[in-house]
Image (cartoon, rainbow, N blue to C red):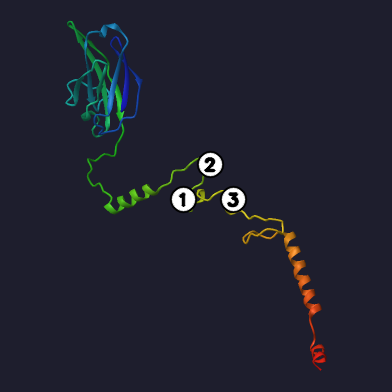
């Protein structure tokens, strides 16, 4: 909503807040009058709108009168802002045979882009489908995090959470009495095992008999 705010002191109308108005606006531009003197109390208050003149006349064909609400507001008629240009606002009040009339205030109207939809191109269904699909796949940016297509999925997170603590831990037992078939050998166990293998090889070397020795025994 665009609000034109004006003050009324005795019979003088003053701009309090101006704003940008665009042509062809309907039901969007509002006026608000602030009455600062008691002589307007109990009066029926009527805003007068005139198009296209800095010093309008109430005899102009484009003059429109709108009675104010109890809160001192009204809507600017759509006919006043049509086709751009300018307009003026005045005010009068009637009560107990008394009529109070204010001066005019002048306002400019900016050009707009509205054309009742003529020549509007509506996107094809395929465009809308692709747009909605893209919106549905978007990822909201969170503070402290970057966006990536290779993100960590909930399925992977749950799978990792199901692994018991220590399930993949390698246990090394450093004693020779272990009967485990899955534990890893320690360096100390490796040296002991290597010494035993060397001792076995030495025994084999001592007990080994050559062919000549066999022949001598047989002869």
Q: Residue at x 33, y 48 (%)?
A: 132
Tell me the distance, in whole angstroms, between the alpha carbons under discs 2 and 1: 18 Å
Q: In terms of secondary structure, where does tag 2 sit?
A: loop
Instruction: Name the quarter where the N terminus is drawn.
Output: top left
Q: Position of residue 114 (x, y in %)?
A: 26, 39
Between label 3 and label 2, give the one nearer the viewer. Answer: 3
- Front residue of this view, candidates 75 and 20: 75
Q: Position of residue 210 (x, y in %)?
A: 80, 86
Tell me the distance, in whole angstroms, between the alpha carbons under discs 3 and 2: 31 Å
Q: In terms of secondary structure, where does tag 3 sit?
A: loop
- Front residue of this view, candidates 12 and 184: 184
Outermost residue to the front? 218
Residue 144 - label: 2
Dividing the picture into quadrants, the one containing residue 49 is top left
Q: Residue at x 51, y 40 (%)?
A: 143
Q: For this view, does 33 lie left or right of residue 172?
A: left
Q: Earlier in the sequence, mark 2 or mark 1?
A: 2
**In the figure, 72 relative to 198: above or below?**
above
Q: Position of residue 47 (x, y in %)?
A: 23, 19
Q: For this view, does 180 lie left or right of residue 93?
A: right
Dividing the picture into quadrants, the one containing residue 198 is bottom right
CB contact under 8 Å: marks 2 and 1: no
Instruction: Work out whether residue 124 can be spotted.
Output: no
**In the figure, 38 relative to 126: above or below?**
above
Residue 166 - label: 3
Q: In terms of secondary structure, where does tag 1 sit?
A: loop
- Residue tagged by mark 1? 153
């Amino acid at each position: 909503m665009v609000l034109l705010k004006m003050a009324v002191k005795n019979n003088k109308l003053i701009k309090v807040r101006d704003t940008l108005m665009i042509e062809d606006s309907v039901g969007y531009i509002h006026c608000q009058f602030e009455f600062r003197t008691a002589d307007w109390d109990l009066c029926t208050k009527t805003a007068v709108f005139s198009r296209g003149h800095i010093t309008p006349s109430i005899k102009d064909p484009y003059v429109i009168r709108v009675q104010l609400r109890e809160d001192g507001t009204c809507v600017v008629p759509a006919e006043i802002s049509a086709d751009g240009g300018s307009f003026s606002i005045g005010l009068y009040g009637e009560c107990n045979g008394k009529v109070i009339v204010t001066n005019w205030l002048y306002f400019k109207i900016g050009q707009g882009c509205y054309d009742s939809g003529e020549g509007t191109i509506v996107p094809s269904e395929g465009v809308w489908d692709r747009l909605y699909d893209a919106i549905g796949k978007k990822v909201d940016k969170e503070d402290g995090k970057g966006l990536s297509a290779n993100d960590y999925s909930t399925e992977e997170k749950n799978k990792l959470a199901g692994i018991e603590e220590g399930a993949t831990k390698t246990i090394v037992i450093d004693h020779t009495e272990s009967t485990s078939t899955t534990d890893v050998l320690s360096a100390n166990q490796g040296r002991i095992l290597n010494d035993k293998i060397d001792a076995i090889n030495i025994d084999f070397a001592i007990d080994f008999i050559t062919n000549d020795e066999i022949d001598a025994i047989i002869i």
